[in-house]
Amino acid sequence: MDIEKITIVGGGPAGLAAAIYNARAFLSPLVIAGSPSGGQLMLTADVENYPGYESISGPDLIKKYKDHALKFGTRFIEENVSKVDFSKRPLTLTLSSGKAVKSQSVLIATGADADWLNLPSEQRLRGKGVSACATCDGFFFKGKEVAVVGGGDTAMEEALTLTKFATKVYVIHRRDKFRASQIMQRRVLNHEKIEVLWNTTVGEVLGEDRVEGIKIKTDGEESNLDAQGLFLAIGHKPATGFLKDSGVEIDEKGYLFTAGRCAWEEKSKKGFHHQCSSYKADPKLFESGFWYQTNIHGVFAAGDCVDYVYRQAATAVGMGVAAALEVEKYLAEI
Ligand SMILES: Cc1cc2nc3c(=O)[nH]c(=O)nc-3n(C[C@H](O)[C@H](O)[C@H](O)COP(=O)(O)OP(=O)(O)OC[C@H]3O[C@@H](n4cnc5c(N)ncnc54)[C@H](O)[C@@H]3O)c2cc1C
């Protein structure tokens, strides 16, 4: 069986950007792009914040990345990786078809999907007024009224971001108190544009091809909320389940650790730094200077499966590029 130099898992912005760099460095990368491939941007109608494009649809942007990667010799398999064996060299990945791929290095770029309520009306109106990213889509709601669902720090941040655009922001929360940090709660509760709807759930999103209101239930009583946008902020699920028992260090929410993330969390005292034990046990991981290497030598990670803070296409691309450059250096050194 051939041994790949670099196998990239994930065909979203991070994986495709890495593929372009590794392909131009004559590493002939293999991308296991996932099924369906393309990632979160495939469901995004308008991207207006990707440098160089004033407006482009998510699928068009992905096609451009993919064509670019193909032009320089990237190979693609549109399947999922279902399990890995990183306990010996070469590294082994097993695909959903059962096919095995052996590789000297691996870059994991499998992203993190937003959690949705899974109401039929919410799914129909995704990208048409229903979103899970205020930084991405808030601008489209200038002068409108919107609602955010959630009660954690992300929901607070989304609501505060939306106050820059919307005239009114409702925060819909199913309990009578937030679990967000005190400082974020205070900012939300004291904001003149924000109204919190406690003990409230969403029944349906109203409208055929745009959001025209939200059916809500407060303490058992139904009513319609006049809003033109609905933002879900109830969590994200990193697509890292296939790494269970692989030895790759993963935090309690499913995000991957890299040496850079560990170093940053140690210094900032933020996040989940207590779990970076394997890095401390293997000083070479830090000495190598690879920010995007996981705790397994030769296994790198980039994009939204690591980044629980920014979650943008441009940041995922940046991480993918940095990881690809580290892969090149790693392969030159082994
Ligand atoms: C509604 C919405 C709107 C957005 N709008 C914008 C915007 O306007 N501007 C912006 O910058 N960002 C936007 N974003 C965020 C942006 O889409 C993400 O930050 C970006 O796509 C992350 O890229 P990624 O490559 O890390 O992950 P993803 O895009 O999630 O790609 C992950 C890839 O991994 C694959 N995969 C998953 N599991 C496996 C597996 N087991 N085996 C193989 N492959 C696997 C998937 O199929 C996919 O190809 C938006 C996100 C959402 C949800």
Image (spheres, rainbow, N blue to C red):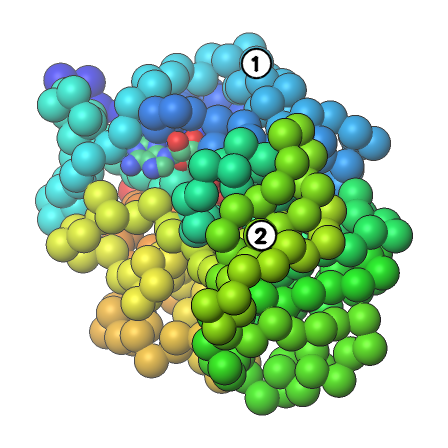
Give the vertical position of 63 relative to 260 (above or below): above
- For disc 2, the marked residue is 215
Query: Can residue 317 be seen from the camera position used here?
Result: no
Residue 181, image x, y percentages:
54, 84
Report which quarter residue 172 is drawn in: bottom right
Q: Residue at position x 24%, y 32% from top?
A: 81
- Decide which of 146, 35 is in the foreground and name it: 146
- The x, y position of residue 130, in whole percent, is 61, 43
Query: Measured from the top left, where is residue 40 in percent x and y?
Result: 51, 36
Residue at horizontal 69%, vertical 78%? Answer: 188
- Left or right? Give the position of 65 relative to 49: left
At numbered mark 2, what does the secondary structure look like: helix, strand or loop?
Answer: strand
How crowded is the residue under tag 1: few (<14 C-alpha within 10 Å), some, or many (20+)? few
Circle count: 2
Q: Amino acid at mark 1?
A: Asp
Residue that mark 1 sits on: 67
Q: For the C terminus, give its image quadrant.
A: top left
Label 2 – label 1 distance at C-alpha:
43 Å
Quick one: 189 or 224, which is closer to the camera? 224
* Mark 1 lies within 8 Å of ligand 1 (Cβ measured): no
Q: Residue furthest right?
A: 143
Determine the residue positioned at 63% across, 67% down: 171
Asked if 18 appears above or below 153 in the picture, the reply is above
Quarter of the image holding residue 105?
Answer: top left
Tell me the kind of residue under disc 2. Answer: Lys
